[in-house]
Amino acid sequence: MKILHTSDWHLGHTLYNYDRADEQEAMLLQMVEIVKEHKPDVFLLSGDVFHTSQPSAAIQTLLSEKMVELHRAHPDMVIIMTAGNHDSGSKHEIYRAPWLTLNVRAIGHLNRENPEEHIVEIPGKGYVVAVPYVNERNIPEGLFPSLINKVEQLNAGGLPVALMAHTTVQGVDFTGHAHASERNVGGIDAVELAEFGAGYDYIALGHIHRPQFVHSGHHNVRYCGSPLPVSFDECYPHSVSLVEIDGHGSAPRIDTIEIVNPHPLVTLPAVGFASWEQAKKLLEEYPDDIPAYIRLNVEVDDYLPPLAHADASLIAEHKQCRFCLINTRRATSASRNDSAMSVQHFREASPIEIARQFVIDQGREFSTEIEKLFNEAAKAVAEEQRLN
């Protein structure tokens, strides 16, 4: 079975109010060309198709059009698209019936009454256990092992078995994800790899944006990563994974295919921080005809000049690049009075970071118990929004 594994498209994502639809369309066109060239048996999209649970009509149209093109590129290919924590499971399944005419299986919710619905047979090629994002507190005990055991009963021909999930696995490298920890990345608590059981040949994971294998001892558990970066801290190559498995029990052969972003995210200077005058000079010297999003890393003794952002925007005005922000670092250690968040920091901060700062400012410790309670409340709100 030949698999094209991708995830975390985040269609509809904007960067500092810049529309990224052109980049996202360019990424999807590359997907179509990859399918034309490699003709996979199955195309696995492991969650976070959209960036929000309420994508615009234009972004939904973009997805629909490109799904048609993917199908035309290789009509025999089965496309399996599961919902991630950013997606609305209900909206994911609205067009489930018409999707089937394009060989697309859209799976937005866990079917608790008939979990075997999540087993998708790829005729003559293999089986895929396709599970969308499920809040960790609501995953039925032994879900993955029970589904794999059912596949074992069906798989008389010894065909490859793949599994899809959108979650955080313990030990993952979460570089590029803001406000993440070993326990929680992007609002999803880490689970042990053992919870997936055994009997699979490959696990196609979504949620973590950095491409990587998760240590399993068999080199067969992988985050393919996001095809486009969603933040400046995702400063690593972005790609899709092409996976080939000869038979059940065989080791997968995995290649990565890089996705080229026509508007890369660039930090000046590339390493470390510069003074405001040095950073301004780097921006002035940035080639006029090269598209990019620009972040300036600036070290300050006290504060930036009042017109710094306006000056940077003016420098970039007649260039192809798009100035986004100035990321500042204090040259000296901050006093307690300096701990207050700037307006820019407040806008960029996650809810838990704001809560942590509030508790600290009250002279209390942001304990593990407080963090746990806050995460539970935030998850409940996010889950309610996702289901609506």
Image (cartoon, rainbow, N blue to C red):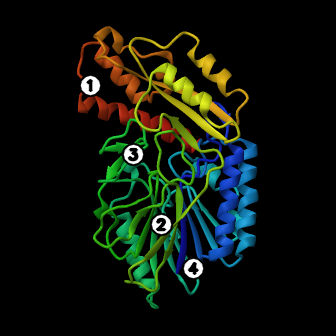
Q: Residue 215 in the image: x percent, y percent?
A: 30, 64
Q: Earlier in the sequence, mark 4 or mark 3?
A: 4
For the question of whether residue 16 can be seen, the reply is no
Q: Quadrant of the C terminus?
A: top right
Instruction: Please indicate whether residue 295 sits to the left or right of residue 99 in the image.
Output: left
Three-letter residue code for mark 3? Thr
Q: Say which mark, if any, is on residue 175.
A: 3
Q: Residue tagged by mark 2?
A: 115
SS of the residue under disc 3: loop
SS of the residue under disc 4: strand
SS of the residue under disc 2: helix
Q: Residue tagged by mark 1?
A: 366
Q: Residues within 10 Å of mark 1 (few under 14, many from 20)?
A: some
Give the residue displayed 50% in from the left and 54% down from the top: 237
Q: Earlier in the sequence, mark 3 or mark 2?
A: 2
Instruction: Using the image, determine if residue 198 lies above or below residue 24.
Output: below
Instruction: Using the image, determine if residue 222 lies above or below residue 78.
Output: above
Q: Residue 167 in the image: x percent, y percent?
A: 42, 53
Q: Residue tagged by mark 4?
A: 122
Three-letter residue code for mark 4? Ile
CA gap, disc 3 and disc 1: 23 Å
Q: Residues within 10 Å of mark 4 (few under 14, many from 20)?
A: some
